[in-house]
Amino acid sequence: MNAPPMEAQVLVMAKSPRPGHVKTRLCPPLSHASAAAVARAALMDTLDSVVAARPNRATVVLDGPVGSWLRSGVHVIPQRSGPFGDRLEGAIEDAFAAFPAPILLVGMDTPQMAPDHLTTAAETLLTGDADSILGRADDGGFWIIGIHQPVPGLCGSVPMSTATTGTRQLAQLSALGLRCVEVNPLRDVDVMEDALAVAAAAPRTRFAAVLRSCGPIPNLKVPAGVA
């Protein structure tokens, strides 16, 4: 018997996987075409896990055009312009306006994310005393943030893509009077060492298969403790 649907919606912040527009930090050693193929696989893995978690609504918040990677039943809204923190905050506001339900927001950079990661995050947000949840990334950022409803100032003032982004986001939630519970950390795919580590940790994903198809990547060491 299937579990009931998750009483939260999931947003995926994504860029259309077009050569030269995504995962450019993987180039070299990858070509822009190969990096785009890797990004497309990561996005599809992410959407598979989102759909399998059975949220009451799934939405891609998209920078760029829709492609064949989009799963049936997944909604699409455009990303706003501006700094990434503003776009995150705007995505939450726009999604909540279209469908007023608690929100889990993730990116397309953690293809190892399993449905259980999302269901656990939803349970933490919905069944306890948490006003918000945050899952940190190994590079110092975060891979998931959850909130019951939009809160002005949630992310816009937090510098993104730094080694202290997760810590500063946690401090911002506290400054807004929001009790935050942290959930499982994951590793973002930003550079090739990350890609190899995540593929090794999740070898059955599309992401891992596409990365393997790109051929051996010489002279790269994968740090221990992958997640």
Image: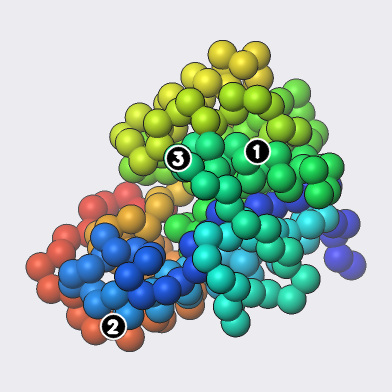
How crowded is the residue under tag 3: few (<14 C-alpha within 10 Å), some, or many (20+)? few
Q: Is residue 144 left or right of residue 190?
A: right
Residue 118 location, x and y as percent?
Answer: 65, 51
> Dot 1 corresponds to which residue?
146
How crowded is the residue under tag 2: few (<14 C-alpha within 10 Å), some, or many (20+)? some
Residue at point 10% right, 68% down? 219
Spatial CA span between label 3 and label 1: 20 Å
Position above or below: 22 against 216? above
In this orientation, does residue 116 appear?
no
Compare marks 1 and 2 and give the one earlier in the sequence. 1
- Nearer to us: label 3 or label 1: 3
Which structural element holds mark 2? loop
In this orientation, does residue 1 appear?
yes
> Dot 2 corresponds to which residue?
214
Which structural element holds mark 3? loop
Q: Amino acid at mark 2?
A: Cys
Residue at point 40% right, 52% down? 188
Residue at point 75% right, 33% down? 149
Spatial CA span between label 2 and label 3: 32 Å
Residue 104 location, x and y as percent?
Answer: 67, 45
Residue 170 location, x and y as percent?
Answer: 51, 25
The quadrant of the image that shows the N terminus is bottom right
Q: Amino acid at mark 3?
A: Pro
Spatial CA span between label 1 and label 2: 35 Å
Residue at the extreme left:
219
Q: Amino acid at mark 1?
A: Gly
Which structural element holds mark 1? strand
> Dot 3 corresponds to which residue?
83
> In which image quadrant can residue 101 be found?
top right
Q: Is residue 45 left or right of residue 177?
A: left
